[in-house]
Each structure stands twice: as structure tokens, then as C-alpha cells.
Amino acid sequence: MVETHVHASHPEIVKRLKRAEGHLRSVVEMIETGRPCLDIAQQLHAVEAAIANAKRALIHDHLDHCLDNVVGPVARADRGPIDAFKAITKYL
């Protein structure tokens, strides 16, 4: 059985993804109506960025909350490795 994991950040992440979904639908419409490729590429870039930001927010939330459940709260002064790991996730 799968355990439910709902965090305070999830509703905001869902909002981001729904905006990206709407944006993606409009990109499809742009292609179907023959809009210029530059316009389409710009909008696709915006969709990619929105999804990447949602993914990053989800991963950072996981690190902030789920990791604390495993290792316990970490003092701000000792969070260097966790903060470095969060920073490197932008390259995922």
C-alpha cells in the first residue's frame, strides 16, 4: 500500500503545474494555428521553466521535511551539506 505524503507546499506546486498545463495547451494551439516558431519556442521555454521550478520546489520540500523525519532536525549551523545538495539539484 502506498503511503500518502501531502506537504504544505503541494497545493502551490499543483498550482504551478496547472498553469504550466494551460500554457502547454496554448503552445499546442499556437502550433496548430501556424504561429511563428520563435513565438512557440519562447512559450515552450516558459513551460519547461515552470515545470523545472515545480520539480525543484518539490525536491527542496522533500529535503526540508522528509529528510528531517529520518535524520532529525539539523541545526542551521550544520546544514551546509544539505544546503549544498539543494543548490546542486538545479542541475538535475
Image: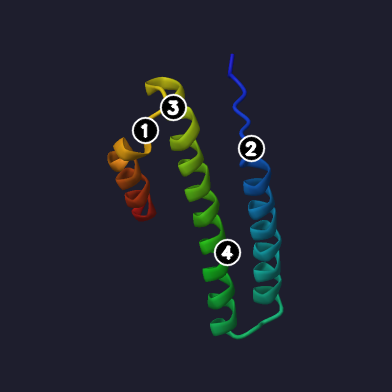
Quarter of the figure with the N terminus: top right
Q: Which mark is residue 68?
A: 3
Give the Cα separation between the discs numbered 4 and 3: 31 Å
Q: Which of marks 4 and 1 is in front?
A: 1
Q: How far apart are marks 1 and 2 (CA)?
A: 21 Å
Residue at x 37% of width, y 30% of height: 74
Residue 22 drawn at (x, y percent): 71, 61
Name which residue type carries label 4. Val
Q: Do the residues labelled 1 and 2 touch (CB within 8 Å)?
A: no
Q: Earlier in the sequence, mark 1 or mark 3?
A: 3
5 and 83: which is toward the camera: 83
Along the line of sight, the residue nearer the viewer: 47 or 79: 79
Q: Which of 35 and 1 is in front in this view?
A: 1
- Label 2, on which residue? 8
Name the side, left or right, on which 86 lies relative to 42.
left
Q: What residue type is labelled 2?
A: Ala
Q: Earlier in the sequence, mark 4 or mark 1?
A: 4
What residue did someone put label 1 on? 75
Q: Distance between the residues labelled 4 and 1?
A: 36 Å
Classify residue 37 by image quadrant.
bottom right
According to the picture, the residue beneath numbered tag 4 turns out to be 47
Q: Are the residues tagged 4 and 3 within 8 Å (C-beta)? A: no
Which numbered disc flags the more N-terminal residue, 1 or 2? 2
Q: Earlier in the sequence, mark 3 or mark 2?
A: 2
The alpha-carbon separation of the residues under discs 4 and 2 comes to 23 Å
